[in-house]
Image (cartoon, rainbow, N blue to C red):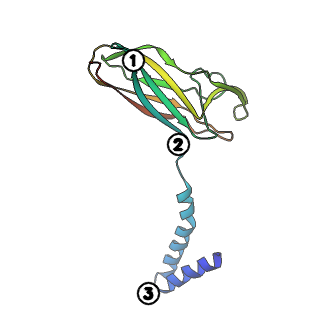
Amino acid sequence: MLTKFVSCIMYLVSCLNTKYKIHYTILLLVTCYLLPFACSAQVQTPVKWECTYNPIDENNGELIIKASISIDWHIYSQLQSGDGPLPTVFYFERTPDYDLVKTVGEPTPETAHSDVFSADVMMFSNEVIFKQKIKRSNTKAFTILGNVECMACNNVSCLPPKKYTLTIKVPSAD
């Protein structure tokens, strides 16, 4: 296979009518050698976030923040502490349209020992839904902006913590 590839390159170079054939040959060989590495450098995004608003009554509602997590990957509880992975953290931009009620709620996480961290960790796999209650200051429609920062790991390695933008449209309460 490699001999056919080199033969093809040499044929293409022989078709060139220039005094710089050696330069073109080297450039073509280096390009063909490095191309597979460039194509395989993919950004991993094992977590996808989705946000919706659930009205409770005219003055209160709930932000529903769902994380869909790729197979074999995990994110960690907001309550994670100690020597393990970084916890998931939520930030919301404050506006006069609403107030946060308490903190972001989460379901009971899985607890397991992680060989990557040599510690017990509290994590979520597959899918997790976080909920944040809000109290509306008015009945008009508005948008809540924020972000979530989390660390995603599999059984072999971890990605650096990543910040995801959250946009939640709150419809009018009329």
Sequence-first tag of 2 and 1: 2
Q: Amino acid at mark 2?
A: Thr
| Distance (Cα) linking label 2 and label 1 | 30 Å
| Quadrant including the C terminus | top left
Whether the residues at callouts 2 and 1 have beta carbons within 8 Å, the answer is no
The mark found on residue 45 in the picture is 2
User: Which residue is labeled 3 in the image?
Assistant: 17
| Front one among 25 and 142 | 142
Please state if 132 lies on the left or on the right of 112 as rendered.
left
Neighbour class for label 3 at 10 Å: few (<14), some, many (≥20)?
A: few
Q: Amino acid at mark 1?
A: Gly
| Distance (Cα) linking label 2 and label 3 | 47 Å
Work out whether 15 lies above or below 62.
below
Whether the residues at callouts 1 and 3 have beta carbons within 8 Å, the answer is no
Please state if 70 lies on the left or on the right of 58 as rendered.
right
Residue 159 x %, y %: 58, 39
Q: Quadrant of residue 128?
A: top right
The mark found on residue 61 in the picture is 1
| Distance (Cα) linking label 1 and label 3 | 73 Å
Work out whether 123 lies above or below 5.
above
The residue that appears at 55% across and 64% down in the rendered structure is 34
